């Protein structure tokens, strides 16, 4: 159930590093005591991630935040215990329009190397489940399969 004002949901959450640490410790204690279902929490965490991503990407919200920030002439200022710093973000350069044949050549060489590296990595990964020893036909070196590490967690998908 949503609150009457959606902003009231966000404004009650912790907003300092200290509050986040305390909140997290309390939350873990409550989960360990069985007050909340771990699967319900997994759903809510996924929903919060999607909510934050959606809110941050919304052009109206971004504009309103920047309008408020622009009221401060300083590059950096503090408000409500948070430091705000105006910065250029999402900077991109298009080097294809520079007319640099050296860059074009290097980029092509890199693309060729990337393809060769990917092919070699695919080959090396294929050795993981083999019992026989493998040797490089050019160098004679023994090829050892790569070390594989991973961790397990759960993927949560929300209903539409």
Image (cartoon, helix red, strand yellow):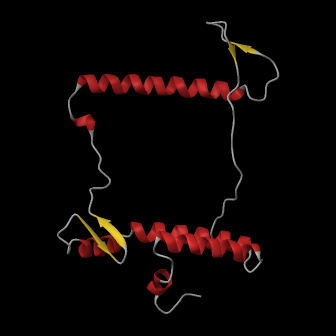
Tell me: residue 141, above or below residue 120.
above
- Residue 46 screen position, x and y as percent: 60, 67
Foreground pick, 12 / 26: 26
Tell me: residue 9, above or below residue 108.
below
Tell me: residue 89, above or below residue 131.
below
13 vs 134, left or right, is: left
Where's the N terminus, which quadrant? bottom right
147 vs 74, left or right, is: right
State whether residue 14 appears in this view.
yes
63 vs 115, left or right, is: left
- Residue 48 screen position, x and y as percent: 55, 71
159 vs 54, left or right, is: right
Tell me: residue 57, above or below residue 130.
below
> What residue is rendered at 28% in x and 27% in y?
103
State whether residue 160 appears in this view.
no
- Residue 98 screen position, x and y as percent: 21, 33
- Find the residue positioned furthest to the right: 131
> What residue is rendered at 53% in x and 68% in y?
50
> What residue is rendered at 58% in x and 25% in y?
119
- Residue 145 screen position, x and y as percent: 70, 25
> Picture quarter containing residue 34?
bottom right
- Find the residue positioned furthest to the left: 73
Q: How many marks?
A: 0
> Picture quarter containing residue 41?
bottom right
Where's the C terminus, which quadrant? bottom right
> What residue is rendered at 37% in x and 74% in y?
81
> Picture quarter containing residue 133?
top right
């Amino acid at each position: 159930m949503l609150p009457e004002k959606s902003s009231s949901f966000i404004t009650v959450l912790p907003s300092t590093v200290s509050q986040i640490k305390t909140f997290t410790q309390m939350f873990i204690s409550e989960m360990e005591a069985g007050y909340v279902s771990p699967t319900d929490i997994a759903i809510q965490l996924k929903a919060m991630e999607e909510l934050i991503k959606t809110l941050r990407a919304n052009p109206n919200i971004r504009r309103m935040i920047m309008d408020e920030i622009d009221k401060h002439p300083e590059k950096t200022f503090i408000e409500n215990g948070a430091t705000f710093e105006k910065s250029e973000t999402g900077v991109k350069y298009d080097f294809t329009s520079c007319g640099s044949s050296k860059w074009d050549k290097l980029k092509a060489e890199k693309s060729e190397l990337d393809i060769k590296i990917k092919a070699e990595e695919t080959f090396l990964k294929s050795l993981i489940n083999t019992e026989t020893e493998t040797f490089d036909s050019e160098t004679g070196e023994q090829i050892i399969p790569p070390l594989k590490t991973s961790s397990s967690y759960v993927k949560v998908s929300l209903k539409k």
